[in-house]
Amino acid sequence: MKYDAIIIGTGQAGPSLAASLASHGLKVAIIEKADLGGTCVNTGCTPTKAYMASARRVFMARSSEPLGVRIKGSVEVDLKIIKNRKDNIVNDSKTGLKKLFDSNEHITLIQGKASFTDDSSLEVNGETYYADKFYINVGAKPSIPKGFENINYLTNESILELEEVPEHLMIVGGGYVGLEFGQMFSRFGSKVTILERGSQLLKKEDPEFGEAIQNILEQEGITIALNSECTKTEQQGHQITVKVNAGERVISGSHILLATGRQPNTQDLGLEHTSVNLNDKGYIDVDDELKTSAEHIWALGDCNGQGAFTHTAYNDCQIVISHLFEDRKRYVSDRFTCYAAFIDPPIARVGMNRADLKAAGIKAKIATKSMSEIARAKEMGETHGLLNIYIECKSNKFLGATFLGVGADEFIHLILDQMYANQDYKVLRDAVHIHPTVSELLPTMLENLKPLD
């Protein structure tokens, strides 16, 4: 029951770390209380993007007439088939992980719930395990606001188990989870109402992007209710009472999805028996190398509050591995914030935006362009969206970018890579890109920088 290292959780960081440790001859245990693969494989990226692919097929089938493609008859959606396809993709990933663990003599998979007894040991299923090093990779779960305890609400996890399309899906929360599921199920045939208590969708983004996304969703028939605070819930018919500004109105629907944020899975790990410190939101405090306040304990992935994305979780693994085995050391502070919301078209972000720059008092220039001005977008018939790029006046370096439009989740990497290369924006400005593409307009944009107001 003694190991060189014990990893808690098989999310994005865990299996890769286990494989690396094992490749160096270390005896490793990896513990999982639920399904192998964590959020990304089971209830996050993998299943939702499979659903979004089906939803896009529906959208294209129903909206191709302006491009000269007429489909006779109705376009029908079978959620059972969509779910079965998703389940098969998820199971393939889980099977691959099981093979990884079973085929490696240095890795022991332990199924059960881990609870620390002190800084050097933990219990699983009544057995005690010891290790020289511990790596916590327990992820996060949906946060459920007060007032919904007595209704049959859905989360991003349970909605993926539905086999019938909801008649009217009400979504509490206008963040990326709520928007992705809202557009997805609207295209499947649900009436969708999104209730956001703030003044815009995607509150972390600049207002013009929240407004543009609202317009896109409303054109697809989705009802958006901003400044909507949920004040009362009733089980009968899944009726929810929403307070909007100074008034009050009742919205009734068949299903309610709560998309109101996430919280770390750190409450029942027995961390009170260790010297690991948590912040006021329950995330594990870590340093730039992902070490906790306890000697020989690290925290990776969503539970450390340093990113909450699959790509940042994997980078956490890379950071830890670099300090264990590599000459070049990596740090959390090395990386730029980057993410995407996979609505259609997607919105992608790297680095700072207008609000961040103003708050920091940084003098910057902006390049901006509407997708409706881009030839390739016109040719594809997908002209929704806009592009903003921010350049520091003093250094001529990229500070960030926000892109909304077809392909934005891919060509945002042109800016991201320039930022990691620490290049003057003129390098991209003077590049010759392939025509006709959306990204060919980025150099042209950078020829027309304007002072940021």
Image (tube, rainbow, N blue to C red):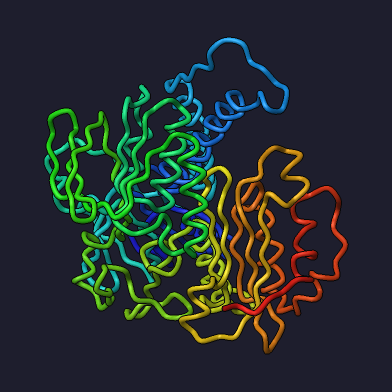
Of residue 438 and residue 295, the one placed in the foreground of this image is 438
Quarter of the image with the N terminus in it: bottom left
Q: Is residue 227 above or below residue 361?
A: above
User: Left or right: 13 with respect to 400?
Assistant: left
Q: Is residue 230 above or below residue 77?
A: below
Of residue 142 and residue 176, the one placed in the foreground of this image is 176
Q: Residue at x 27, y 56 (%)?
A: 114
Quarter of the image with the C terminus in it: bottom right
Residue 35 coordinates in the image, percent (x, y): 38, 42
Q: Is residue 105 visible?
A: no
Of residue 307 and residue 287, the one placed in the foreground of this image is 307
Residue 185 position by quadrant: top left
Residue 124 coordinates in the image, percent (x, y): 26, 54
Q: Residue at x 51, y 63 (%)?
A: 312
Residue 207 coordinates in the image, percent (x, y): 47, 62
Of residue 436 and residue 421, the one placed in the foreground of this image is 436
Residue 56 coordinates in the image, percent (x, y): 57, 33
Q: Residue at x 51, y 71 (%)?
A: 320
The image shows a total of numbered marks equal to 0
Q: Is residue 80 visible?
A: yes
As drawn, the residue found furthest toward the bottom would be: 394
